[in-house]
Amino acid sequence: MKALLLAAGKGERLQPITETRSKPLVPILDKPLLLWHLENLERVVDKIYIVIRKEDRETISSLVNGHKVSIIEQKEGVGGTGTAFSSALSILNGDNFLLIYGDIFYDFSLLSQIVSYQDNIIVGKEVGNPRDFGVLKMSNNYLDGIIEKPDSPPSNLINAGIYKLSSDIATFVDKVKISSRGEIEFTDIINVAIKENYKVNVITYKGFWIDIGKPWHLLEANNFALSLANPNIKGEIEEDVRIKGKVIVEEGALIKSGSYIEGPAYIGKGATVGPNTYLREGTVLGKNTKAGSAVEIKNSIVMEDSKIPHLSYVGDSVICEDVNLGAGTLVANLRFDENHVKMRIKGKLEDSGRKKLGTVIGGHSRIGINVTILPGVKIGSYARIYPGAVVNRDVNKGEFFRT
């Protein structure tokens, strides 16, 4: 058995997170999403192929060194999952294979079940927002077709991006045209194949699954990973530190006196916490980060090398790599009217479905002292926020913002 992982997406809806890293490299508990896929696929298949963007080859080649992986560059021209698949046709060689979308996160134990089936398989997942996905039509557990992002979904069962297929599917690639989104879609290949009597069984999956397409999805994926992790204290814990619940402290991390940590929480290698710091449930600190004196962090991701030195509050937020927050930075994560927080995605204001959502700050940004950031605001990478500012709108990449 072999696996084909499609990991060539740009991740435009994840910006500003993906302004400084490719989508496969967004971190879950300080480990790139791509590695989560590879490490779990290696348990069930003999060989893994990943389709990536040409510009990501050097970074990803270094990352996957030591894994049983071959890299395939996506063909230039029209993008899309169908193009990614067609870039890898030469590796099929008549074999059955797994095909996985690289931007999903789920309970990977599902893979051992999928490889055991003899038939072609597509995994379906019931969700509350089927309009955002490809919705499955089926009869007698067989797939009748996939409708991409329908205005009136026939059901809540969507395409989870996990397949087990025979190599015959390759014969239908050249019969697919460019979609209305300007891409070659793998789902269109499936639809053409079904019309020509290619049978695909639908397996409905009940466990955790998320398509990491928008910034708040990264919070949900990290929360699920925390729920699976085992508590483990490897770093240094000074006196008068209180640790409650499931907490992971990696080697080289230091928790200074007076700090209070409520799990589940993750503290990466070389991170420093405290003194007198409060880390609440859902906090994930990447390697070489700092949460300094009198800092409170709740349900947030702080990526590698970022610093929150003192007297700040960060809630329900994503802080990308090498960001520095000045003293007194306050992130508001709840609207006055307590309605869902909205965030602008590719120019369109979207409902996050969350009552609490703070900010997303792109990599290498600098925040001055006594700055307040309002709910749902995004700050682009390399931005500079002037001291005392109230950030009440999105800030562009590299922008100097002052009020």
Image (spheres, grey):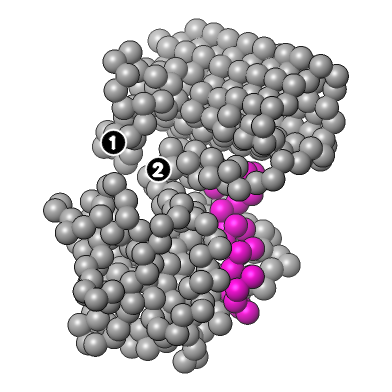
Q: Quadrant of residue 15?
A: top left
Q: Position of residue 354 (x, y in %)?
A: 36, 31
Which quadrant is the C terminus positioned in?
top left
**Residue farthest toward the bottom in the current orientation of the protein:** 94
**Which secondary structure lies at badge 1?**
strand
Task: Please give the name of the residue rendered at 43% of the width and 38% of the height, measured from the top-left corner.
Answer: 216
Q: Position of residue 249 (x, y in %)?
A: 75, 36
Task: Please give the name of the residue rendered at 61% of the width and 48% of the height, measured from the top-left corner.
Answer: 228
Asked if residue 30 is among those painted magenta in the image, a careful observer would answer yes
Label 2 is placed on what type of residue? Lys
Q: Quadrant of residue 165?
A: bottom left
Residue 179 visible here: no
Name the foreground residue: 56 vs 225. 225
Asked if residue 193 is among those painted magenta in the image, a careful observer would answer no
Relative height, residue 118 to residue 223 (above, below): below
Which residue is identified by label 2? 214
Q: Is residue 26 left or right of residue 78?
A: right
Label 1 is placed on what type of residue? Glu
Name the foreground residue: 219 vs 401. 219
Relative height, residue 34 to residue 214 (above, below): below
Q: Are marks 2 and 1 in contact (CB under 8 Å)?
A: yes
Task: Please give the name of the residue rendered at 44% of the width and 63% of the height, measured from the top-left corner.
Answer: 101
Q: Quadrant of residue 248?
A: top right
Q: CA–CA distance between discs 2 and 1?
A: 10 Å
Number of numbered discs present?
Answer: 2
Magenta stretch bounds: 26-48
Which residue is identified by label 1? 350
Graded by Cα atoms within 10 Å as few (under 14), some (14 to 19) or many (20 or more), the crowding at tag 1 reads some
Relative height, residue 97 to residue 208 (above, below): below
Which quadrant is the N terminus positioned in?
bottom right
